[in-house]
Amino acid sequence: MRRAVLIAIPYVWLLALFLVPFFIVLKISLSDTALAIPPYTPTLDFSEGWTGIKNFFSQLDLENFVWLTEDDLYWKAYLSSVKIALISTILTLIVGYPIAYAMARAPEEWRPTFMMLVILPFWTSFLIRVYAWMGILSNEGYLNQLLLWTGIISTPLTILNTNTAVYIGIVYTYLPFMILPIYSSLERMDGSLIEAAEDLGCSRMQAFWLITIPLSRPGIIAGCFLVMIPVIGEFVIPSLLGGSGTLMIGKVLWEEFFSNRDWPVASAVAVVLLLILVIPIVLFQRNQQKQTEAEQ
Amino acid sequence: MNTEVFAPWDDPQAKPLIQFQNVTKRFGAFTAIDNLSLDIYEREFFALLGPSGCGKTTMMRMLAGFETPTDGHILLGGQDIDPIPPNKRAVNMMFQSYALFPHLSIWDNIAFGLRRDNMPKRDLEERVEEMLRLTRLEQFARRKPHQISGGQRQRVALARSLAKAPKLLLLDEPLGALDKKLRQDTQFELMDIQEKTGTTFVIVTHDQEEAMTVASRVAVMDQGKLMQVATPDRIYETPNSVYVADFIGDVNIIEGRATAQGDENYRIDWAEGQPPLTASTATQLSDGQGCHLAIRPEKVAISAERPTDAINAIQGKVHDIAYLGNLSTYHVELPDGTIIKAQTANTRRISRRSFTWEDPVWLSWTATAAVLLEN
């Protein structure tokens, strides 16, 4: 009995906070837009009984999904989101791996401090940190002031409202998600493995490529998914740091909802986005499972 | 059969494979190895024995190249190896944790070192198969390290470190992770493999029984210094200090004062009201010099009556009996409270044991049974 209750808790949680909202969104995506509150038809009316329900289902159609294929804005936005997500994941990996490596190699007593420093940014609002980057990257921002003052450049660089700013923002924001899983896989690694590799004839560099990288692979994969999955749907960073040229599906979604007030199309965009994300999520799950199996 | 005894250390013509020349290693203020000189010969199975922190692991890590001496030099085959990095040394090491690469199969683990040398594929495959045969691991070649048992992992580690046919193989507590029974079997396996391959082995261990079993020579270390370097039987029979006598096996230590009594014979006065003891030794002691007498329990005879012909005999009563199955160790308390251990083989059924608790007994031993050690 107690076991059943314990198992039920996560399922009820999933049902209430994921499946129910998802079916509401799915339902809206099959509806038509209307000048009403809520701004779509049909709405389910139980007072008419069985005919009301039948009537309701007969009015649902795939019109909005067809529309997504007709306007090239959508697939371009999806594609561009995936591209930005891939590039920023690679950038985050390039920046994050050395940091994680240095942390794992640091003296034991220093590691909690470094860990703290990685987590520290989470203590302030994400939005405020992105605004801070606007202050740094704008034409009159701190970065340009510094570069002008040192004489490296003579005219200010335009970084804000370009894709570069979006990449900087994403790498900055998602770096901890990359560092932590890589760090945890590197930290568990037995230091004598590197010595054994050297003893058997590897140079330091070879030992790194042949031993360290393969053994931290689960961490790398986990980190990449943890960064890529949310970045595909990212809205705040491209809308605050990106320009008109930055096309991301999160931004399109927001505009459909709040500017166009076309909830059904926006819902269809969201449903397709979810379908796109299911692929990496399943791959991620499989990686985690393989890792736990290997540890047993 | 080759009847010649393997003892290059007694041959002044023999050239040592490894020479430690006044090696000192300091870590900050801590001196791990203190001005130590040592020769190790080819084909030897050499054991470094000592308690943890005595510097034995540091010696091994210096041989492997992971540490460099602060002072002095280490020579391998006459060549100073201090500036050579570990990956360029003809020395391989078997790690205490085995350090098998968890992402590679047993086969690839063994092939790892050979691949670094760019060995031709044919030769490489042959060599790996040979190593697998030597360590009886053929049917596990495709498995990953986490899919085999501890004893098998130990053999993989050995095969991997032997694959490159090193001049010198270092073994860091190689059997530490195995249970007692498996450890004993593996000790003999190690000796077999050492003989078959003719490689020089240097083993680090804190287990004296293991060192005695496998090694041709044992070096007993304490606080960065060599206390004694000799064959296992010499270490046991003629320890040169109380430390070595006490570290290897069980021993009774009696403190007293020596008086010369003719050629190489000494009288030892050791306690008020007790008859003096007699011991013979080649070392010269001055009259009245403080000394220690070390006697192994198995060399002490125990009897109900005073043996008539015994040169050393003291009386006491049985305080405790440790029954070990094949052996019994009697803890005999002397009138002044000293405990002397005497060991006898249980050749008769336990029900017929001659002595029991609180029985008065006589302990006796010959003049040569005890080792007389200077203070």
Image (cartoon, rainbow, N blue to C red):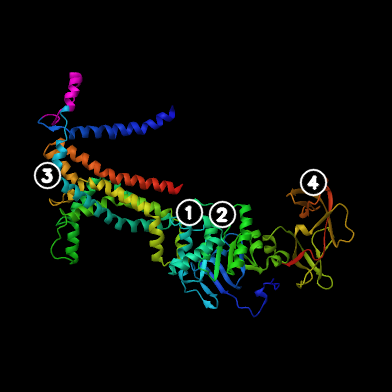
Query: Are dots 1 and 2 in contact, CB under 8 Å?
Result: no
In the displayed structure image, the side of residue A32 where residue B165 appears, left or right: right
Determine which of the numbered discs, if any, sits on residue B143 in the image. Answer: 1
- On the same chain: label 4 and label 3? no
Q: Camera-side residue: A124 or B93? A: B93
- Residue range highlighted in magenta: A36-57
Element assignment for label 3: loop
- C-alpha separation, residue under disc 2 versus residue under disc 4: 37 Å
Q: Secondary structure at mark 1?
A: loop
Q: Chain of mark 2?
A: B
The residue that disc 2 covers is B151
Residue ID at (20%, 32%): A27
Is A74 in front, or is A136?
A: A74
Disc 2: CA contacts within 10 A as few (<14), some (14-19) or many (>=20):
some
Of the residues under marks 2 and 4, which one precedes in the sequence?
Answer: 2
Residue B350 - label? 4
Residue B202: which quarter of the image? bottom right
Q: Amino acid at mark 3?
A: Asp
Residue at figure coordinates x 52%, y 55% from the top left: B139
Q: Is residue A41 magenta?
A: yes
Is residue A169 positioned above or below A200 on the image?
Answer: above
Amino acid type shown at disc 1: Arg
Judge if badges 4 and 1 mark residues of a common chain.
yes
Amino acid residing under circle 4: Ile
